[in-house]
Amino acid sequence: MLSPQGFAGEIRLARGALCPVMSPLAVSRGSGGRATTVKLKAAGGRYIVMVLGPASGGAYSLMVSDDAPVGLTEASSSAVISGQTLTVGKIDAAPDRNYEVNDRRLLMQRQVENRRAELARIAEQKRRAEEQARLERERQRLEAQAREEERRYAEANRPDNTALIANAFIGAINDAAADQRRQNIANQQLNRRLADIRRQIAAKQAEQRAASEASEARRQAQQASTGQERRQAIAAQASANARAEQARAAQAQARTPQSEQQANFEVGRSFVPAVPQEAGAARGNGGTQLVQRPAATTAPPKRSYPAVMEAISGCAPRAKGRYICFTSGDSMGAIIGPDQASGWRTPEEWVAFVGNCSRRSPAIPLTGGAVAWACGYGLSGITRIDVAQKLGGYVQGRATFYCDPQENYCRRRTPTADR
């Protein structure tokens, strides 16, 4: 029993040897200055009594009844809680000199019980997890069994879908045919574009050929003009020389031999021929006369050009009446067939439409169904592709031309001809 004086007392009672492991048993609070009592039946061991007193001043008395043999030790510590002093005392009920050993035994027992409880909890968790896994496996088994039964039922009640399969097959065939038609249309459009490109190339080649021919004509005209001017200069020089000779002969008739020699010396010193001269001795009425003659001119040797084969166009057969055709200026080739656009259905239409062989020969049949046409100009310049190699055979009847490697549409039939 706690008897406070001037404050509200409070008693807290716990069992245990140490504060960290003590077990709270009872709490009693008083009001005013009334006494506070805590009753319990001691089970042995050590008890801790905590008295909450005033922060300053006042007094209290603590009395333990003799219902059980107990002993009260002095307060071992005190603390201030909310302005009040908490005094901790120890009460030994049924004092036992081995109480420390007993308390340790109790602590160990509690630890063992806690461990057993932990192991039991772990075992329970494991059991629950195993049970959950078993239930999950059972659920999966039941679901698989249900799916298998549904599959069997669906297979047993499946309608005859032969017509559906046939319709799907026919639809696939129609789709393939539509794809083929679209591909044919795309090929035709591509061939048209290629034809346009080839026509542009042919026009450009014709323009280059015309420019080359005009340049050659200008060169020949310039050469002819230069030769004419040279001949006129030689004739004018010869005429001037003749007039000088006539003047000197007239002067020689009126002079003495000494004055004639001096005059000849003066005339010879003042006369400068424009071309190499030949000196000839001719005797006139007054003595020896020098005759000036123009030297003979030698024309430069003509250029000799290498020999090349004649350019050709040709077509090689492919499957289903189709051909692949090449020109001497196109190594890619064009697809020719009955399903193509106009101008691309037969090799004959193609060679007339493309126009690469403007002076083409009659068709030359080759082995394996191939056909070729000779074009009338040599393999040089922009038309240097030998189509015979594309066709894989020797083409008879090809002419030989003599061309510069960079010359376009060369038609020179001799090594030294101008064209």
Image (cartoon, rainbow, N blue to C red):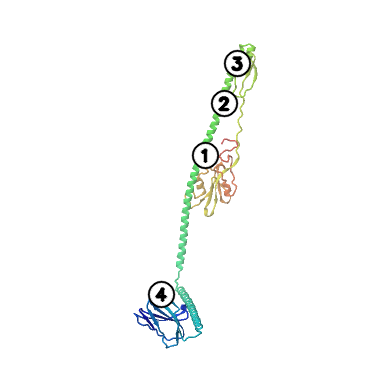
Image location of residue 369, percent across then percent down: 56, 51
Q: Is residue 95 left or right of residue 405?
A: left
Which residue type carries mark 1? Arg
Asked whether the beta carbons under mark 3 and mark 1 sit within 8 Å of each other, the answer is no
Q: For the point 53% across and 51% down, which residue is it? A: 323
Q: Which numbered disc, 4 or 2, marks the residue that appears first in the sequence?
A: 4
Q: For the point 54% across and 31% down, which residue is it? A: 222
Q: Mark 4: which secondary structure?
A: strand
Nearer mark to the viewer, of 3 and 1: 3
Alpha carbon distance from label 3 to label 1: 58 Å
Q: For the point 55% across and 30% down, which residue is it? A: 224
Relative to 239, say whether 13 is above or below. Answer: below
Relative to 50, say whether 309 is above or below. Answer: above
Q: Mark 1: which secondary structure?
A: helix
Residue 231 is marked as 2
Image location of residue 253, percent across then percent down: 61, 12
For disc 3, the marked residue is 248
Q: Is residue 157 left or right of residue 379?
A: left
Asked whether the beta carbons under mark 4 and mark 2 sit within 8 Å of each other, the answer is no
